[in-house]
């Protein structure tokens, strides 16, 4: 009930947020005054069972906006639905683990758990400078493609199986538990020749099967008595010329004599079953060749039968929207230079707006406060100035 009321006030009456900000600051000062003489602040730690840092509520109440929702997250006894997982890690930009200063743990996806929200803001500012200066990613789209890349749900490929003739990839046991030969694609290729024509059934062995009773008048009994590799096929009558409507007007052309070898060979029109008797590749060879066909979706070097077709359209839309919001925060397009740092590496005014926008995209309902971002940028500029002074003083 309290959350619904605060959310309605924040949405419908934006001016109330200033009063809530003052109330939030007063509550924090009162809590600090009451807790200071009695209990020292506990050292924050990462709780793997909760996938959260133990002090995330205090940090969220002091550093996040809007103030009404931050106050709800601070005082609530349960985890509100609008609180993203990175909020509980004091990581408002969802940065991955890389031995950052203040890093005390991480979740199963590799997101860093920071001791304080200030440590997370410092890491975000430092990482953006690395992207901009070292990696040369100066546009919003280039930054987002590295910051939040598309995954497509593809697992890491296994080691390929070796063959003396064709190197075919290994088969995932989860995708084809009975092996590659029993997948739907392999069974289709085994039943059809090139071009999709159905294969001719395998020749029936001579003599009746022990588990099959063959009647004397059945086709199996007749075919079992004929020697040879294939069962006898019924021949179609040879084609005869049809009488012309204007018979007698023109003299018919003399019949051409064909060589004996050509005349003995059955034609497709005379014997359609002969078309299916042509030798073709084995099913295993067809399956191996199908793996080397051009990929259906771009991004895969070969058509890997182990993996489902990648569906990255949703990720591409997400990346484009992410980059659009970042660029719009500084009045640019997603392909324009964001102008985050100057030639010497000093932060420019656009850096604060970009960091605030990125935090809002990562957290959804909540976002980092301006004070947190400005303090991180100030520390980044001071560190850059100290590094430049030390470099100039070095002989």
Image (cartoon, grey):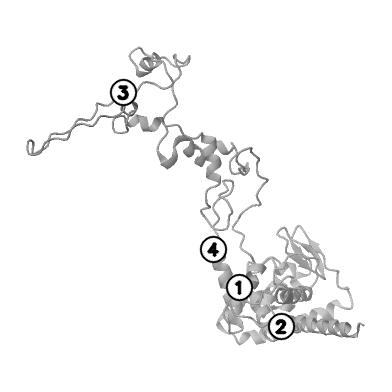
Residue 363 appearing in the image: no
Q: In the drawing, does residue 219 fall left or right of residue 20?
A: left
Residues under labels 1 and 2: Cα distance? Answer: 17 Å
Element carrying mark 1: helix
Between disc 4 and disc 2, whose residue precedes? 4
Disc 4 and disc 2 in contact, CB within 8 angstroms? no
Residue 225 position by quadrant: top left
Residue 141: mark = 1
Residue shown at the point (86%, 69%) measured from the top left: 43
Q: In the drawing, does residue 235 fall left or right of residue 201?
A: left
Q: Name the residue under label 3.
A: 234
Disc 1 and disc 3 in contact, CB within 8 angstroms? no
Residues under labels 4 and 2: Cα distance? Answer: 31 Å
Residue 178 locus on image (x, y percent)? 59, 36
Residue 103 locus on image (x, y percent)? 81, 67
Q: Name the residue under label 2.
A: 341
Residue shown at the point (35%, 30%) measured from the top left: 273
Disc 4 and disc 1 in contact, CB within 8 angstroms? no
């Amino acid at each position: 009930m309290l959350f619904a009321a605060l959310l309605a006030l924040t949405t419908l009456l934006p001016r109330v947020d200033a009063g809530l900000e003052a109330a939030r600051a007063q509550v924090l000062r009162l809590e600090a005054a009451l807790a200071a003489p009695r209990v020292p602040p506990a050292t924050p730690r990462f709780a793997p069972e909760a996938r959260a840092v133990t002090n995330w509520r205090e940090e969220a109440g002091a550093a996040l906006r809007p103030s009404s929702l931050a106050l709800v997250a601070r005082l609530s006894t349960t985890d509100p639905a609008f609180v993203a997982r990175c909020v509980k890690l004091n990581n408002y930009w969802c940065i991955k683990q890389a031995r950052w200063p203040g890093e005390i743990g991480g979740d199963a996806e590799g997101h860093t758990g920071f001791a304080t929200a200030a440590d997370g803001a410092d890491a975000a500012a430092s990482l953006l400078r690395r992207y901009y200066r070292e990696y040369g990613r100066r546009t919003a789209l280039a930054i987002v493609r590295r910051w939040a890349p598309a995954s497509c749900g593809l697992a890491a490929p296994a080691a390929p199986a070796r063959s003396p003739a064709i190197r075919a990839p290994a088969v995932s046991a989860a995708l084809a538990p009975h092996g590659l030969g029993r997948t739907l694609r392999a069974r289709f290729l085994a039943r059809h020749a090139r071009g999709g024509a159905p294969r001719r059934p395998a020749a029936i062995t001579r003599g009746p099967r022990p588990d099959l009773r063959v009647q004397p008048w059945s086709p199996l009994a007749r075919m079992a008595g004929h020697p040879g590799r294939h069962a006898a096929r019924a021949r179609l009558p040879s084609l005869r010329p049809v009488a012309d409507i204007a018979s007698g007007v023109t003299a018919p052309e003399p019949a051409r004599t064909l060589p004996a070898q050509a005349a003995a060979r059955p034609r497709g029109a005379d014997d359609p079953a002969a078309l299916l008797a042509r030798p073709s590749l084995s099913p295993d060879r067809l399956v191996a060749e199908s793996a080397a066909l051009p990929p259906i979706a771009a991004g895969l070097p070969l058509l890997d039968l182990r993996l489902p077709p990648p569906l990255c359209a949703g990720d591409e839309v997400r990346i484009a929207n992410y980059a659009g919001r970042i660029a719009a925060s500084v009045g640019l397009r997603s392909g324009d230079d964001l102008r985050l740092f100057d030639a010497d590496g000093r932060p420019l005014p656009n850096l604060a707006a970009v960091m605030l926008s990125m935090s809002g995209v990562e957290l959804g309902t909540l976002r980092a406060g301006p004070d947190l971002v400005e303090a991180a940028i100030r520390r980044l500029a001071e560190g850059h100035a100290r590094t430049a002074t030390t470099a100039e003083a070095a002989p």
